[in-house]
Image (tube, helix red, strand yellow):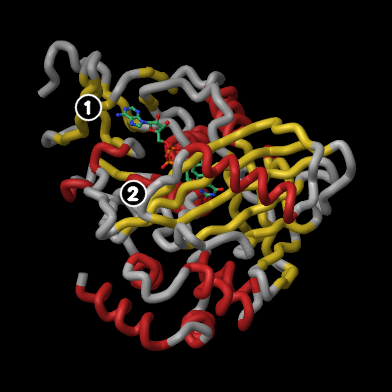
Amino acid sequence: MLKKHEKIVYDYIIAGSGCAGLSLLYRLINNPVLKNKKILVIDKSEKIANDRTWCFWEKGKGVFESIVTHQWKKLEFKTSSFNKTFDLNQYSYKMIKGLDFYNLVLNFAKKFNNVTFKFEEVQKIETDVDHAKVKTEKGNYLAQFVFNSTPIFNPKMDASNSLLQHFEGWVIKTKKAKFNNEVGTLMDFSVSQKHGTTFMYVLPTSAHEALIEYTLFTEKLLDKEDYRIALEKYIKEDLKIDNYEILHQEFGIIPMSLAKFLRNPKAEKRIINIGTAGGFTKASSGYTFQFIQKNTEKIIHNLLLGKSPNPEITFRESMYQWYDRTVLEVIISKKMQGKDIFYKMFKKLSIEQILKFLGNESSLTDDLRIISSLPVKPFLIAGIKRLSK
Ligand SMILES: Cc1cc2nc3c(=O)[nH]c(=O)nc-3n(C[C@H](O)[C@H](O)[C@H](O)COP(=O)(O)OP(=O)(O)OC[C@H]3O[C@@H](n4cnc5c(N)ncnc54)[C@H](O)[C@@H]3O)c2cc1C
């Protein structure tokens, strides 16, 4: 029964208009069958800043191909004693700027009168018999389904079950041509490991411009100054660049957690968690963008079939979650350093095998190859522990 202030019933409410919410919106309004559905998008703030850069790998062209800033067919992996450049073959490693993504989706959505935006803080999401209800400080909104990417249902995370992937990235512009924009450096572990798993990430978009990111997987954040010092040192001593200008800076924290993020919070079929909130951040690497794309594509598929939109977790997905949790357990329990795990994989395997595995696209035979590249004892102990929890 609707109350007086609960007049409009939407088909879908998208709570949180970041990567997952807008990816879903874009797919909905691009679909000939779903594009006229009544949709409400709620976020606490407007998407007007270039607040993040997404990188991911995929085969062929994706839905967001038109806004890919740059893509690489070769990636480099480095430690102080090992250096290899890999051909990605069927994959491309791609970069999308946050603001390009927000603008693309929001400008397209303006053409749809059936899509409403509200800037309000979501306080609660619940269900009654016929609807899902989103409560904000300004009112209650009803829908058949709510797709939530706000953190309101997130599990409790602390140092016992989680690591933080934290990073500061600078886009720099050099006077002289200093970069080869055909090769990205996925991980350069030659930097100090005194804080824990630490690497540099260098993605040149031209001979004069590159995104350089200082990334750590640790329990605690560093002091703001430490990121700056590490980046300056790396640019000067490793990249041998003295003259540059910083065009853009970004700082990020991505949870790498053993805690369970539920797709169906409260086991309610009308509330569907998407994005990081739904567990689509890969626990062992922090990559999320490509998993959000696969999940929102499945949601559209299910809606078209008239099925519950929430994609069921397949047996393979559960296996990948177990692998991720095992790797994370090994790092959290300090049985092995992240640097050594990645080194062993990159030394013995092709990058295609690694990307397939990290992208949840490997076969069981591929999985066995990955497993056999790693030492048995720490992974067996961690794997057994993570089977039971
Ligand atoms: C700086 C940075 C760089 C990243 N780079 C990569 C990368 O290269 N590759 C990759 O795969 N992943 C990357 N990630 C991880 C991941 O892809 C992003 O965090 C991605 O934005 C997650 O999408 P999401 O929709 O789950 O969350 P978000 O994009 O954060 O969206 C959540 C939305 O919910 C809104 N919100 C939160 N609380 C409320 C509330 N109570 N009420 C209303 N609205 C609310 C927020 O304002 C936000 O708009 C990066 C993350 C960061 C922070």
- Is 84 rendered above or below residue 209? below
Horizontally, residue 112 falls left or right of residue 59, namely: left
Comparing 71 with 41, the one in front is: 71
Q: Quadrant of residue 326?
A: bottom left
Q: Is residue 300 visible?
A: no
Comparing 133 with 355, the one in front is: 355
Asked if disc 1 and disc 2 are in contact, CB closer than 8 Å, the reply is: no
**Residue beneath the point at 31% across and 26% down:** 10
Q: Which mark is residue 278?
A: 2
Amino acid type at circle 1 is: Gln
Horizontally, residue 212 falls left or right of residue 364, namely: right
**Residue beneath the point at 70% across and 33% down:** 246
- Extreme top residue here? 4
Residue 356 in the image: x percent, y percent?
Answer: 56, 69
**Residue beneath the point at 21% across and 69% down:** 389
Residue 354 in the image: x percent, y percent?
Answer: 58, 72
Is the residue marked 2 within 8 Å of ligand 1, measured from its CB?
yes
Q: Secondary structure at mark 1?
A: strand
